[in-house]
């Protein structure tokens, strides 16, 4: 469900289009890329949210570091914690080796949370704690692991409406909706 995409060749190096609105988006990408702000990208399915996230990463000071894409809609709730945080050997039946989670794999780079609106409330809570504390603990782990990463999230859902309906954490929404 998560994959490190370090190869720049997987994504175009710029937006395609010459309209004023496309130039405006491209300029904004450059402005946001120069900061380390958390970014929330919204838009309909197929509008290029992952491309925008990748461009922000490629134009940022973290460009030479990992870009890890996490598809929140594809991770079952039962696997979310181990996918994001990893696990220690022996943490559960079948955990024969230590496994790094997506957040650790993205360390010093960018973690892109695609379809963040599909993350369960429990997952939202654990994710919020990790980005606020800037540390994780692997399942079965005894020590915290510091994180230095940029978070970019995307969704095709109206998160303000989902917050009003009680389906998305208000504090996480405000944490994500920085740029």
Image: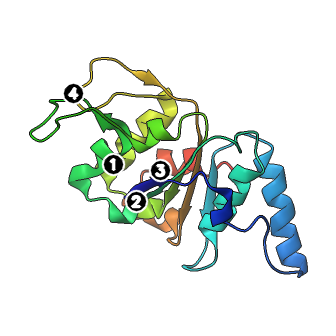
Residues at circles 2 and 4 in contact by the CB criterion of under 8 Å: no
Which numbered tag is attached to residue 170?
A: 3
**Sequence-first tag of 2 and 4:** 2
State which mark lies toward you, 1 or 2: 2
Mark 3–mark 2 Cα distance, whole angstroms, equals 18 Å
**Sequence-first tag of 1 and 3:** 1
Residue drawn at the location 52% of the way across and 70% of the way down = 158
Residues at circles 3 and 2 in contact by the CB criterion of under 8 Å: no
- The N terminus lies in which quarter of the figure? bottom left
Residue holding disc 4: 140
Mark 2–mark 4 Cα distance, whole angstroms, equals 23 Å
**Sequence-first tag of 3 and 2:** 2
Label 1 secondary element: helix
Residue holding disc 2: 72
Mark 1–mark 3 Cα distance, whole angstroms, equals 14 Å
Badge 4: few (under 14), some or many (20 or more) residues near its Cα, within 10 Å?
A: some
Residue 67 sits above or below residue 16 on the image: above
Label 2 secondary element: helix
């Amino acid at each position: 469900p998560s994959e490190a995409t370090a190869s720049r060749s997987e994504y175009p190096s710029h937006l395609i289009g010459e309209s004023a609105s496309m130039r405006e988006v491209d300029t904004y990408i450059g402005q946001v890329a120069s900061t380390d702000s958390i970014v929330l990208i919204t838009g309909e399915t197929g509008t290029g949210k992952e491309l925008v996230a990748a461009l922000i990463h490629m134009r940022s000071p973290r460009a030479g570091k990992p870009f890890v894409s996490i598809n929140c809609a594809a991770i079952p709730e039962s696997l979310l914690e181990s996918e994001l945080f990893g696990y220690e050997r022996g943490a559960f039946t079948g955990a024969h080796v230590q496994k790094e989670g997506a957040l650790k794999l993205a360390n010093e780079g960018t973690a892109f949370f695609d379809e963040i609106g599909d993350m369960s409330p429990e997952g939202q809570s654990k994710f919020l704690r990790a980005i606020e504390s800037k540390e994780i603990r692997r399942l079965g782990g005894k020590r915290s692991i510091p994180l230095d990463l940029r978070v970019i999230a995307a969704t095709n859902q109206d998160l303000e409406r989902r917050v009003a309906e009680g389906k998305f954490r208000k504090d996480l929404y405000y944490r994500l909706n920085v740029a």
